[in-house]
C-alpha cells in the first residue's frame, strides 16, 4: 500500500492508542527537503517533531511498529502526561 499522510497517521494511532487516550494531537506530512516523513505530537504548549525514514513508514503501513517512533511517543507521554494532570483523561 502507498504511504500517504492519512494512512500513516491512522496506522500510528492504531499502534499507539495512548496518543488518543491522552488527547495528544498528531500530524503527519512528507518533507521533500528531508526526503522523510515528519510526525508532530503536540499537547498544549508542548511539541515533539520526529522524522520517520521512508522505509520505516512503509513498514509501519505494512503492520510493523516503528521502534524509534514508539520511543519518541513514550518519552513525550512520560515528560508531559505522567507527572501532571494536563494530559490525564477526565
Image (cartoon, rainbow, N blue to C red):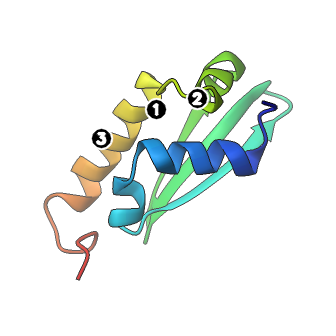
Disc number placed over residue 69 in the picture, else none: 1
Q: Nearer the viewer, mark 3 or mark 2?
A: 2
**The C terminus appears in which quarter of the rendering?**
bottom left
Query: Residue 71, position in %: x, y?
Result: 35, 31
On the image, which quarter does residue 73 sit in?
top left
Compared across the picture, whether 36 is left or right of 78 comes to right
Q: Which residue is mark 2?
A: 60
Q: Residue at x 30, y 41 (%)?
A: 74
Q: Nearer the viewer, mark 1 or mark 2?
A: 2
First along the sequence among labels 1 and 2? 2
On the image, which quarter does residue 35 sit in?
top right
Would you place residue 32 above or below residue 84 in this image? above
Would you place residue 15 above or below residue 6 in this image? above
Compared across the picture, whether 77 is left or right of 5 comes to left
CB atoms of marks 1 and 2 within 8 Å: yes
Crowd around label 3: few <14 · some 14–19 · many ≥20 (10 Å): some
Name the foreground residue: 27 vs 10: 10
Query: Residue 23, position in %: x, y?
Result: 40, 69
Query: Residue 10, position in %: x, y?
Result: 60, 51
Q: CA distance from mark 3 to mark 1?
A: 10 Å
Query: Residue 79, position in %: x, y?
Result: 25, 50
Compared across the picture, whether 48 is left or right of 11 comes to left
Q: Secondary structure at mark 2?
A: helix
Compared across the picture, whether 76 is left or right of 81 comes to right
Q: Which residue is mark 3?
A: 75
Q: Secondary structure at mark 3?
A: helix
Q: CA distance from mark 3 to mark 2?
A: 19 Å
Q: Residue at x 78, y 30 (%)?
A: 1
Q: CA distance from mark 1 to mark 2?
A: 10 Å
First along the sequence among labels 3 and 2? 2
Name the foreground residue: 11 vs 87: 11
Crowd around label 1: few <14 · some 14–19 · many ≥20 (10 Å): some
Amino acid at each position: 500500500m502507498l504511504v500517504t499522510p492519512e494512512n500513516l497517521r491512522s496506522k500510528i494511532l492504531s499502534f499507539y492508542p495512548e496518543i488518543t487516550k491522552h488527547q495528544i494531537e498528531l500530524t503527519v506530512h512528507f518533507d521533500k527537503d528531508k526526503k522523510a516523513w515528519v510526525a508532530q505530537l503536540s499537547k498544549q504548549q508542548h511539541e515533539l517533531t520526529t522524522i520517520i525514514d521512508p522505509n520505516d513508514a512503509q513498514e509501519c503501513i505494512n503492520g510493523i511498529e516503528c521502534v524509534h517512533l514508539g520511543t519518541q511517543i513514550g518519552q513525550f507521554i512520560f515528560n508531559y502526561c505522567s507527572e501532571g494532570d494536563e494530559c490525564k483523561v477526565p
